[in-house]
Every structure is written in C-alpha cells, then in structure tokens.
C-alpha cells in the first residue's frame, strides 16, 4: 500500500501573548489510500486541532502534512471537512449548499447540467434529495449532517475529514448515520480521517484507531488495528470476539492508562 | 405538517433494511371558506379594535380639553375643519412653496431617499472594512464613536458652508445621520460571522469577492438590516428639522411656515402625516429585510 496522507512530526503550540500552550507533540501518522482511520481521545486532548491542521485551517508550529507527495498548509476542497455542527449556510437551501461547493470545485471541468446532476447525485447518496428545497432550519440535526456529508463528498476530496460528525445527534440517528457512512465508504472507497470520542463508533467504522494521550502536549499513545471484515453489521458485531477485544483495548487505554483527571 | 412523512422516509431509505417502513400519504383537508374567513376576521379584529378604541378615547379627551374657551390648541374637530382643503386636495400647486402636502412630502422623501441610499452604500462598505480589518477598526472606530454623537443639525451649518446650497446640505445631513448605525451594526455583523462559515469559505477556497457576496453579506444581513432600520428612522427625524432651517418645498418647512402663519391645525395635520410616513418607511425596510433574509432577521 502506498503512503497517501502523512502527518510528519507535527507540533502545535498556541501562543497568546507570552503564554504558550503546547497542544500536540510529535504527531506522526501515515494513512493509506481508502483507509478509514479514527482518532479518539478525551475532550481537550487536541484531536480537533489535529484535524484542523490536516484541513489546513490551523497552521502547524513544526512539522507538516503531506498529501500524495505534496505538502498541504492551506485549506482546500481536496480535504473536505464535515464539521461537528454541520456548518450549513442557513440562507441557502439544501441544494444550494451542496451546489455552492460543486460550482466552486468543478467550475472549469463540468458544464451547468453536469454540475446540477452531480449535486443531485450526492444528495441522493445521502438520501436527502427529497429535501433539496428546504433550508437547514427546516430539517433535523441528522439530516443537516447528511447534507454536510453530501457537500463534502461532492468536492471529491482525496481525504474526507470528519470532525465528530455524529457528536451532536441522538443515539438512534447516530446509528443510522454511521451505517450510511459505512455504506458510502464501501461504495466510494474514500480515505477518511474521523475524530470521535465514542468507542463503539470508532471500532465499528475504523480500520485503525489512533488513541491520543491527554493534553497538554498530547501524543499518539497507541494505534490499534481493527481486523474486522467489511461489510460490518452492527448487530452481528455485538457478540463478535474481535470487536469486543478491540473495544476492550480502547476502553482500557482511555479509562485506565490515560484517565481524564479533570472530568472526575 | 410534513415532518412525519420525511421522518419515515429517512427510516425507509436507511441502508440496513430496505422496504421497512411504509410511507403514508398525508391528506390535507381543505378548510371550508367560511371558517377561514372567520379566522381572518378574528385576527383583524384583534389587531384593529384595541388601537381604534384607544385612539377614539384620546381624541375624545383632546376634544374635551381644547374645546373650552381660551384653549391654546385647536380640538380635533377644528383641525379637521381647518385643514379639510389640504386633506382632500394634496396635489394643488400654486407656484413657489404654496403647494399641496403631497408635493411637500415627496420633496422630503426624495431628499431622504438620496441621502439614505448613499448612507446605506457607504455605511455597509465602511462597516465591512471596520468589521473585517483589525487595523481599520483600531483607526476608525474611535473617530466614529465621537462623530456619531454629534446631533444631526449641528452638521447643517458646516454643510451649508461647504455646499453653499440647501438641497445638497440637507441630503448630507440625512447621510451623516443615517450612516452611523449602519456602520456600527454592519461591523458587529461582520465580526460575528461564525468561524464555521469562514471555515466553509476557506475549505471551498472562495476568493475575496465570492466570500463577500456568498458568506459575509448574507451572514451579516440581520445585523445590517438592524442598522438600516435605525438609519431610516433617524433620517426621517432629521429631515424635518433640517428643512425647517433650509426652507423651500418640504414637510419640515411646511410646518415652520404654518407656525409663522399661526395655522396650528396645519401643523397637527403635518405631524400626523410625518408620523404615518415614518411608520411606513420603517415597515418597508422591515419587509425588505424579511424578504432578503428569508425571515432570519428577527425584529
């Protein structure tokens, strides 16, 4: 397998006046094409910062990110982000939100009709074509997240970055969306980097789980391979010994070796 | 109304199990015309009856107070009698400033329209600059904070000195009165653009022009329209005072002229018109705001 996305000796320090806060230290991670990698850690450990650096929204202090042999240090549609709070533009309809991205990314390569078809195709992928003329305020949280996903997929990103995409949703909606994401990953074989704090979600969706130590100066504590065959079925996995073992490993890491002291 | 349907569709389309839930057709029963009319009549009554009652009461008190001998102000019945000609024929034009109220009001409105339009354009532009650039804010904001407290009429002598003519001076006074709330609210709106929207713009690599039109203006629109609403109100306040000093055709000078000729009833009629038009202007800006922002600009 080729190295596709490389995070190379990445440090991130936030400076406010004379006060310096080291958030990330020496993060090195290689992600292969088509791989689904989750980053898990307690809140405040800097996992969102890491995603923002990969997205190019936050500059790295030292080290950097290499995508397909090229360093990336500014945001771009090749690393589309699905934000935790959907970030749909409320003054545009569902269709227009996706279309804005399609128009921007494919303005030179697709005709008007093709761009329309591509927008509708992506809304179809997330089963949101029926609500294309609704505004974000008129649809539920899960639907908004689906549209956010459609917008990101429509950019045909090299890497799809998911920043706790299901964090704000109720358990049932979350399960539906996780299933959708699994189906889409199976179908499109895209490379995904997902931030999460949900152990089950990480094990269910990922090929590898990256566990982060607590901040400040968070590091990668452990990387766990999830050798479960795909397609995965939520119900069958519930009693699967590999699944349970992976889950156990992550839980041990988070709650025994790297307990979040502030939460107590 | 459509929520149950869309919900069940989501479930039905979920990949794990296909053809699970059945989508039930939603039958909307048309309400009979009579009950709809009754509903309209009810809301109308709720809105119209209380103000009408209060108005009738106020007129009655006014009438009783001013009817006595020696009252300095005319009662409403006298106002109506004295100004009947002005009310029924607002379009007469006998040359000079002896015109119907329509012409006075339209002259004032034209000045306001021009000054306010200029203030809107300049205000949104300057507000965007101040909201977007830290340096512009540091440099300009203190100046704005001082200048905005200058009363509108204090600008009039200065603008008369600069323009040497009443018309551009009054337009300038409107401009300078309306611009501050527009600048300040626009700047707040731009500064409050959620980081998420900026991130979306960054990921899509929108250029400055696209970012301005597709993210900044729509996102700041509720704030901008708050500024525009305050601005139109202030403009209409300032025009009457400015015209009193400048003279010529205009509702402000009409009032001043009526005072000089002791036509108190005409003053009262003019005040009524000024109030009504100010109200309509405010409503027009609110309606435009609701239309443009799809109702996200709360009042």
Image (tube, coloured by chain):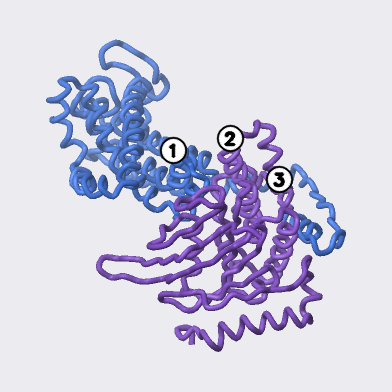
Q: Does residue B82 appear in this view?
A: no
Q: Nearer the viewer, mark 3 or mark 2?
A: 2
Q: CA distance from mark 1 to mark 3?
A: 30 Å
Q: Give the labeled residue for mark 1.
A: B285
Q: CA distance from mark 3 to mark 2?
A: 49 Å
* B271 and B249: which is toward the camera: B249
SS under mark 1: helix
SS under mark 3: helix
Q: Are marks 1 and 3 on the same chain?
A: yes
Q: Quadrant of the N terminus of chain A?
A: bottom right
Q: Nearer the viewer, mark 1 or mark 2?
A: 2
The label number, if any, that marks residue B36 in the structure image: 3
A245 vs B242: above or below: below
SS under mark 2: loop
Q: Position of residue B18 (x, y in %)?
A: 85, 60
From the viewer's perspective, tell me whether residue A242 is left or right of residue A106. Answer: right
From the viewer's perspective, tell me whether residue A14 is left or right of residue A65. Answer: left
Q: Give the labeled residue for mark 2.
A: A107
Q: Are marks 1 and 2 in contact (CB under 8 Å)?
A: no
Chain on which label 1 sits: B
**Which chain is purple in the rendering?**
A
The colour one sees for chain B in the rendered image is blue
Q: Nearer the viewer, mark 1 or mark 3?
A: 1
């Amino acid at each position: 397998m080729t190295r596709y996305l490389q995070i190379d000796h990445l440090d991130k320090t936030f400076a406010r006046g004379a006060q310096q806060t080291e958030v990330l230290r020496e993060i090195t991670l290689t992600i292969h094409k088509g791989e689904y990698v989750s980053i898990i850690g307690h809140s405040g450990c800097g996992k969102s910062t890491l995603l923002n650096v990969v997205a190019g929204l936050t500059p790295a202090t030292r080290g950097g990110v290499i995508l397909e042999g090229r360093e990336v240090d500014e945001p771009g549609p090749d690393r589309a982000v699905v934000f935790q709070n959907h970030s749909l533009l409320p003054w545009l309809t569902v269709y227009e939100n996706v279309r804005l991205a399609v128009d921007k990314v494919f303005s030179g390569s697709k005709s008007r009709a093709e761009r329309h078809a591509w927008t509708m195709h992506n809304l179809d992928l997330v089963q949101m074509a029926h609500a294309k003329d609704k505004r974000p305020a008129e649809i539920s949280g899960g639907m908004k997240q689906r549209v956010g996903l459609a917008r990101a997929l429509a950019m045909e990103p090299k890497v799809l970055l998911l920043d706790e995409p299901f964090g704000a949703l109720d358990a049932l909606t979350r399960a539906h969306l996780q299933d959708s994401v699994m189906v889409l990953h199976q179908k499109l074989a895209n490379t995904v980097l997902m931030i999460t704090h949900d152990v089950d979600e990480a094990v269910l969706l990922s090929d590898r789980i990256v566990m982060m130590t607590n901040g400040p100066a968070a590091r990668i504590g452990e990387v766990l391979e999830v050798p479960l065959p795909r397609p995965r079925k939520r119900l069958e996995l519930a009693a699967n010994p590999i699944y349970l073992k992976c889950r156990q490993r992550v839980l041990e890491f988070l709650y025994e070796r790297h307990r979040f002291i502030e939460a107590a | 109304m459509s929520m149950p349907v869309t919900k069940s569709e989501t479930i039905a389309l979920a990949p794990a199990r296909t053809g699970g839930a059945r989508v039930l057709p939603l039958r909307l029963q048309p309400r009979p015309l009579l009950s709809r009319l009754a509903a309209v009549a009810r809301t109308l009554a709720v809105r119209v009856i209380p103000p009408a009652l209060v108005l009738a009461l106020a007129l009655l008190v006014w009438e009783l107070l001013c009817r006595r001998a020696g009252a300095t102000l005319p009662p409403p019945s006298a106002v109506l009698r004295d100004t009947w000609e002005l009310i029924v024929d607002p379009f007469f034009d006998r040359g000079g400033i002896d015109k119907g109220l329509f012409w006075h009001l339209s002259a004032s409105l034209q000045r306001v329209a021009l000054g306010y339009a200029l203030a809107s354009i300049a205000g949104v532009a300057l507000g965007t600059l101040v909201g977007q650039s830290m340096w512009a804010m540091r440099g300009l904001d203190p100046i704005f904070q001082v200048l905005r407290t200058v009363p509108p009429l204090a600008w009039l002598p200065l603008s008369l000195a600069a323009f040497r003519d009443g018309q551009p001076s009054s337009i300038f006074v409107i401009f300078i009165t309306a611009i501050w709330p527009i600048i300040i609210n626009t700047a707040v709106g731009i500064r409050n653009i959620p980081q998420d929207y900026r991130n979306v713009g960054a990921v899509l690599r929108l250029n400055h022009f696209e970012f301005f039109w597709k993210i900044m203006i729509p996102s700041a629109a509720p704030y901008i329209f708050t500024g525009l609403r305050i601005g139109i109100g202030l403009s209409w306040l300032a025009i009457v005072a400015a015209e009193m000093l400048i003279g010529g055709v205009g509702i402000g000078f009409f009032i001043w002229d009526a005072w000089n000729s002791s036509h108190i009833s005409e003053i009262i009629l003019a005040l009524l018109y000024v109030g009504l038009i100010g109200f309509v202007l405010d409503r027009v800006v609110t309606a435009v705001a609701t239309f443009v922002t799809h109702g996200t600009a709360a009042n």
